Each structure stands twice: as structure tokens, then as C-alpha cells.
Image (cartoon, rainbow, N blue to C red):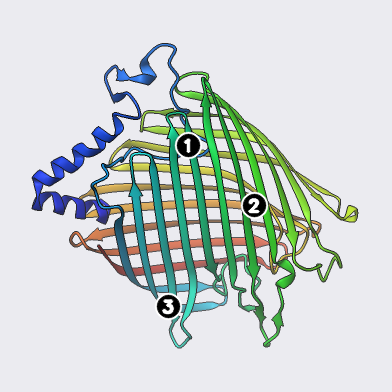
Amino acid sequence: MPLRSFLQIGQCGAASVLCVLGLAGPVLGQSRLGGGDGSGTDNLRLLPGVYPATPTEALPIDFGGLREPYDPYFNIDWSVALRGAYTTTDDGEQYDVLLVPEVNLEHVGSRSQIALDASAEIDQPVDGEINVSGLRLGLTTGYAVDSVTALEANADLSVTRERSGTPGLDSDIVEAPQTIVGSVDGGITRQFGRFNVGVTGGIERSIYGDTTLSGGVVRDNSEQDLWTLDSGLRIGFQATPIFEVFAEAGLGREAFDHPSSVLLLRPDATNWSIKTGVAGQWSSVLAAEASVGLGLRRFDAASLGDVRSQLYDARLVFTPDPTWRFTAGLATDIAPPGPDAEGTTRVQYAVNADVNYTVNSWLVLRALADWKTARFDGGGDTETGHGYGLGADYNLNAHTALTADYGYDYSNSATDGPEDSHRVTLGVTVAR
């Protein structure tokens, strides 16, 4: 069971009357926005000819935990993890000490939802310098204008740096570049009878630092800095209370700060995409979605030509009971190659799956696996890889847990050949 659930149970034990009132609040709040409590025939989805909200919105907003206005404006959760890691790669072995603080602020009102998440990963290799290998900040907001219209806006900022020796990273890289990515996006979804229409738009900024190579050589990656604009339109038709057929179209723009030192021009491009698929949701047990389509990346410079690709996307969430949760996904990514890669476009297909099992109130087990393949148009390079991992959380009490994880990664590229790594991590997490 997650640590947050332990805390809620402890609070109910201390003041059971208040917990009963607190649990009754969401039910009262929900009654104003939708009919049916989901039990028996008291459910709008079971009434003939009635088609409520689409099973998988283009902009999904979860208002299932509505609370009354007199509750605290923000629920605050935080945790601090201290971990020791041992990693072995083709280049040798390494010991690290990791400090991972996280904080979450969440507000859910009768119409609005706001969530702020922040986390960092501070890495101290043995006999090495302290390094901030990851810093992430995310803001998600949603607002229900009425029973058929929803607004959503998001903002994200991440600062990351890959570890040297990571499979897929060139073997002569001593220090990978720092990557800074910031984005803002938003959209609106509205229901028109059985039709659901969603419009989205966003802007993203990517900045890449220098790469340090063996021998002290420093490579400048500023030519990869770029702005990305995206927009999308999604139209869905709810054929039944469970299944929805939909179509999506996207239009985007990529603008680089500087010309490429290899191409001697700026590889600015316009992206088009179109997909069609089907989505379904069976109560809270199973949600699935699959789509296929075509993507086109057209460069401003005619000499670079066009990049065409097939688009395949799918996702599956299966929760047969509160103790089990299975998720799986297939995604297509078409983007610039990034630093330390050749070509004009990276086309990647990735599959991932994970499972979580709550054995009892003090033990949680988890496992994950992934696979990917990528090609680099304009450069002829290819890359494949896969990995898997196992982990467990042992809850000592409502605020403290022991964690153990093992991860394996494998990569095989045309330039570096096969590489793999094994990583074992042990630690303790203290949470609110």
C-alpha cells in the first residue's frame, strides 16, 4: 500500500468521526455534476440512448475526488529518499549516493483542479563531485466550465543529464550535455451529443549544454537549441457507452537558433500528422486505446527533403482489483536527432509495460520492461534497445519505507555496437 494511504488510515484512526464527514464530502460535491453512483442500475451509462462524457477524453480531467470549499485549499505531500546505487557497465563499475526529494501540492474544488509537482535527483559518486542529475517541476490545472466543457493548462520544466556509460550514449563521452526543456500547453474539450471535440496548443523550448569527450575535448551543442510549436484537433464519436471512435490531426513547427555545422543551414521543419483509432473504458477495471496514422516532417530547405513515417500508438490500463495494476503502451516519436547523434530526424518506436502488486499493508512489489528501436533519417544510423527492472517497497510505518530495485539496460547502435548495464539500488524513503 502507498505511504500516502498509510497516512490517511492513521488520520482516520485518530479521528474517525472527522474521516466519515470528510469521505461524505466528495459524494455531496459530485451529486451536482453528474447522476448515478455507479452501482447497480444507478448509472447514466446503463440508460438506453444516453451517452455521457467520452470514456477517454482528449484532455482527461479527474474530478472524482471533489471536496467541499471548507477543506484546506492545498493538500501537501512530500518525501525524501536516500539511496545507494551500484552500477556496472562495459566501461567499469561505479558507486553512487542519491538524494531524491519530492513535493506535491494538490487542490480539487467543485469545478477546478490544480496540482504542482517538484522533484530533484542529487547524485554523489564515490570520489566524485556532487551532480544534480535531474530537476523537474510540473503544474497541471483543469477547470470544468459546465457539464460538457472542460479547460486544461499545463507547464513543465526539466533539467537532466545522462550518466556517462549509459547504454546508447557514445562510449567516448565523459560528461553528457545538460538538457533543459520547458513547455506550456493547454486546450479545451467540449461534448456535442455523441461527438467530443478537443483543441490543444503548446510551445516548448529545448536547450543543450556542452558535451565533454575523452581527452578533454568539449563539443558545443548550441546548434541543437530550438523552439517547438504544436497544435492538435481531436474529434471522437461515442458509438456506445463504452467504445469511442476518434480521429486526430496535428500541426507543428520547429525553429532552430543556429545553422547546423554539418548541414551548413538551419534544419527548420513543419510537422503534420493524422491518426484514427478506437478507445474504450469498462468501469474502473479496464481502459484501452489504439490508433494508427501517418506523419510527415517537411524541411524548409528543399535539399533536406521530407521524412514520412507510420504512426502507431496504444495504451492499456488494467486494474482487476485494488491490489493489482497493469499498464502497457506503444508510442511513436518523430523529433530532431538531438546532441551526439547524426542525421536530420529521429524516428523511434517504443513499447513499455509495468505491473504493481500490493501484497499486503506493508509490502508492494513492482516490475517493468521496455523495448525501442530508432532510425536516423539523413544519417543512416540505427539504434535498438531493451530493459527490465524489479523492485519492492517495505513499509516500516506510515512515514518510512525501505526500497530495493534492480534494473538492466541494453543498447545496440550502428556506431557503438552492443552495450549493457546492471544497476542495484537500496535506500530508505521518509514521507509526510
Residue at image coords 25%, 50%: 1
Q: What is the count of numbered marks? A: 3
Distance in Å between CA atoms under marks 3 and 1 = 45 Å
Q: Position of residue 396 (x, y in %)?
A: 19, 62
Direction right: furthest residue: 303
In the rendered image, which residue does mark 2 sit on?
373
Left or right, residue 296 beside residue 403: right
Disc 1 on helix, strand or loop?
strand
Residue type of the residue flagged with mark 1: Ala
Q: Position of residue 395 (x, y in %)?
A: 22, 59
Q: Earlier in the sequence, mark 3 or mark 1?
A: 3
Q: Residues at badges 2 and 1 in contact (C-beta under 8 Å)?
A: no
Residue type of the residue flagged with mark 3: Asp
Q: Which mark is residue 150?
A: 1
Distance in Å between CA atoms under marks 2 and 3 = 29 Å
Crowdedness of circle 2 by 10 Å Cα count: few (<14), some, many (20+)? some
Disc 3 on helix, strand or loop?
strand
Q: Position of residue 217 (x, y in %)?
A: 70, 85
Residue type of the residue flagged with mark 2: Thr
In the rendered image, which residue does mark 3 sit on?
96
Q: Quadrant of residue 159?
A: bottom right
Left or right, residue 110 beside residue 267: left
Direction top: furthest residue: 48
Q: Position of residue 97 (x, y in %)?
A: 39, 77
